Image (cartoon, rainbow, N blue to C red):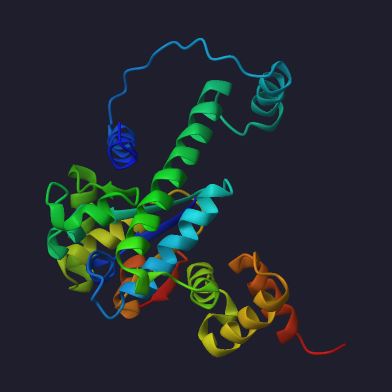
């Protein structure tokens, strides 16, 4: 089963900016993922597209070239996930981006899920019944 | 083609969602082909040998591109290169390891291991730290 790593807004912003106080920490996590991929461990990193919007991550912008090259896949806010995210937002009152995080977590296939986040409380809230590992930054 | 351009192009191709397929005349060792077919049929590790081969090839290429991106980043920003202690902490955080909350202990374990095993992986160090944390029988 694949280990899914989901990034929140601050994790993404930290990754982009070498001057960000949490950059070193998120880069270390990215390095661990890269090393595991090299050893054929099933692991993938995703970013919900609503998180990308909140973080200002435009994949066509040269400012984001480093995160763009780290094989971080988009998890799109399609019709079904928009409905699910609306439900999460209605129940919990979290932001649109965090609601989308919840949808990605709750709809993930069986397997380990790690959320890299600066807000562990909200992530546990939006995860619902899913068991997640929170890597707090 | 320059290395940097090649990496960019590989990354673009990996991100391409195009479903078009091509026949190839790739020659692989017969034993490997037979092992893959057996693993698919008897162990159900993929829906077909082609799927298995494609997934393995993608994972390898993703790992190569990701590591190239990180290496370029370290060259540009040497202060962002994580040491073994940073990587052990990152691995523990991603896994939700019980020692993730004890970075000092993990750094100490990294220092001890690196003295005799400079090529140790973060997971090696984590195992060592875990063993040391066990109460003596």
Q: Quadrant of residue A10?
A: bottom left
At a point 36% along the width and 58% down the height, the residue shown is: A105
Horizontal side of residue B90 vs A46, given as left or right = right
Q: Position of residue A99 (x, y in %)?
A: 22, 63
At a point 19% along the width and 44% down the height, the residue shown is: A78
Relative height, residue A17 to residue B16 (above, below): below
Residue B114 seen in render: yes
Of A97 and B83, nearer the camera is B83
Image quadrant holding the C terminus of chain B, namely: bottom right
Q: Position of residue B38 (x, y in %)?
A: 71, 23
Image quadrant holding the N terminus of chain B, namely: top left
Horizontal side of residue B72 vs A110, given as left or right = left
Residue A128 seen in render: no
Horizontal side of residue B1 vs A115, given as left or right = left
Q: Position of residue B132 (x, y in %)?
A: 74, 84
At a point 48% along the width and 76% down the height, the residue shown is: B86
Relative height, residue A47 to residue B23 (above, below): below
Of A25 and A2, nearer the camera is A25
Q: How many marks?
A: 0
At a point 53% along the width and 15% down the height, the residue shown is: B26
Q: Position of residue B134 (x, y in %)?
A: 75, 85
Q: Quadrant of residue A28?
A: bottom left
Residue furthest out toward the right:
B137
Relative height, residue A40 to residue A21 (above, below): above
């Amino acid at each position: 089963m694949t280990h899914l790593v989901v990034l929140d807004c601050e994790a993404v912003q930290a990754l982009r900016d070498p001057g960000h106080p949490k950059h070193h920490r998120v880069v270390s996590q990215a390095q661990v993922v890269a090393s595991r991929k090299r050893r054929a461990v099933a692991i993938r990193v995703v970013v919900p597209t609503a998180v990308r919007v909140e973080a200002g991550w435009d994949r066509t912008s040269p400012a984001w070239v480093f995160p763009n090259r780290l094989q971080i896949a988009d998890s799109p806010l399609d019709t079904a996930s928009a409905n699910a995210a609306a439900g999460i937002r209605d129940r919990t009152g979290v932001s649109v981006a965090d609601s989308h995080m919840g949808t990605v977590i709750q709809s993930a296939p069986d397997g380990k899920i790690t959320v890299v986040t600066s807000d562990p409380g909200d992530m546990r809230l939006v995860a619902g019944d899913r068991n997640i590992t929170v890597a707090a930054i | 083609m320059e290395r940097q351009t090649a990496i960019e192009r590989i990354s673009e191709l990996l991100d391409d969602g195009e479903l078009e397929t091509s026949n190839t005349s790739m020659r692989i060792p017969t034993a490997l082909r037979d092992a893959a077919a057996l693993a698919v049929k008897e162990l159900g590790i993929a829906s077909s040998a082609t799927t298995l081969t494609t997934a393995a090839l993608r994972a390898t290429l993703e790992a190569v591109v990701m590591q190239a991106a990180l290496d370029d980043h370290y060259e540009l920003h040497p202060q962002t290169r994580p040491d073994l202690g940073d990587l052990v902490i990152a691995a523990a955080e991603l896994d939700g390891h019980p020692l993730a909350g004890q970075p000092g202990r993990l750094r100490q374990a990294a220092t001890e291991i690196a003295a005799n095993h400079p090529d140790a992986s973060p997971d090696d160090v984590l195992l060592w730290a875990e063993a040391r944390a066990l109460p003596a029988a």
